[in-house]
Amino acid sequence: QVQLVESGGGLVEAGGSLRVSCAASGRTFRSYAMGWFRQAPGKERELVAAISSSGYIIYYVDSVKGRATISRDNGKNTVYLQMNSLKPEDTAVYYCAAGPDTTYPRVNQFWGRGTQVTVSS
C-alpha cells in the first residue's frame, strides 16, 4: 500500500512557474513508477508526466514538453513536477499516482487526492 499526498499547488500568473510535490508513505516507494495526472473542469483526466522507478525513463504529454520536468528523490520518498511558462490551459487539479513499472507510463494503482493549480491570464 502506498499513500500519496500532494502539495505545492496554488495560483500563479501566466508565464510563471510552480512546483508540485508528492510525498509517498512506505518503504517500497523506490519500486514504483510515478506519474502526474491533471483534470480540468469538464475534461477527462490526462497523464501529464511519468517517471519509471529507476528514474531513467520519463514521459511527457506533448502539451507540456519543454515546460515541465518530473523528478524523484527516492531518499525522500517524493516525486516532483516543475512547471514553467505556465498557461491558463494548465489550470487543473493535479494528481499524483503510483504503480508498477509494468503499467508505465499510465501508472494508476495508487492515487493522491490532488492539488489545485490555477493559472491566471
Image (cartoon, helix red, strand yellow):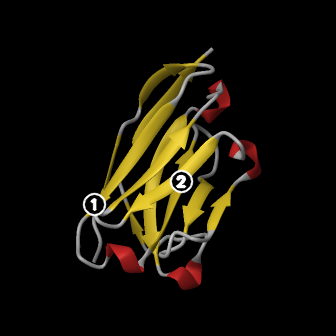
**Residue 13 in the figure: left or right of residue 76:** right
| Above or below: residue 91 compared with residue 12 | below
Q: Which residue is mark 1?
A: 76
Compared with residue 84, is residue 113 higher up or lower down, i.e. above or below? below
From what the image shows, is residue 46 above or below residue 88? below
Amino acid found under the numbered disc labelled 2: Ile
Q: Residue at x 40, y 80 (%)?
A: 31
Along the line of sight, the residue nearer the viewer: 56 or 60:
56
Q: Residue at x 64, y 44 (%)?
A: 43
Circle 1/circle 2 CB separation < 8 Å: no
**Residue 37: horizontal and vertical position, in percent?**
54, 54
Count residues near mark 1 (Cα–Cα under 10 Å), then give few for <14, some for 14-19, many for 20+. few
Q: Residue 67, position in %: x, y?
A: 66, 39
**Residue 34 % position (x, y):** 47, 66
Name which of mark 1 and mark 2 comes first in the sequence.
2
Q: Is residue 114 visible?
A: no
* Residue 102 shows up from this direction: yes
Disc 2 target residue: 70
Please state, as top left, top right, bottom left or bottom right, where the C terminus lies in the image: top right
Q: Residue furthest left?
A: 26
Report x, y in % for residue 28. 30, 79
- Place residue 104 in its image quadrant: bottom right
Q: Residue at x 47, y 75 (%)?
A: 53
Quadrant that contains the N terminus = bottom left
| Dot 1: element | loop
Instruction: Give the class, few, some or many, for how many residues have Cα within 10 Å of label 2's Cα (few <14, many ≥20).
Output: many
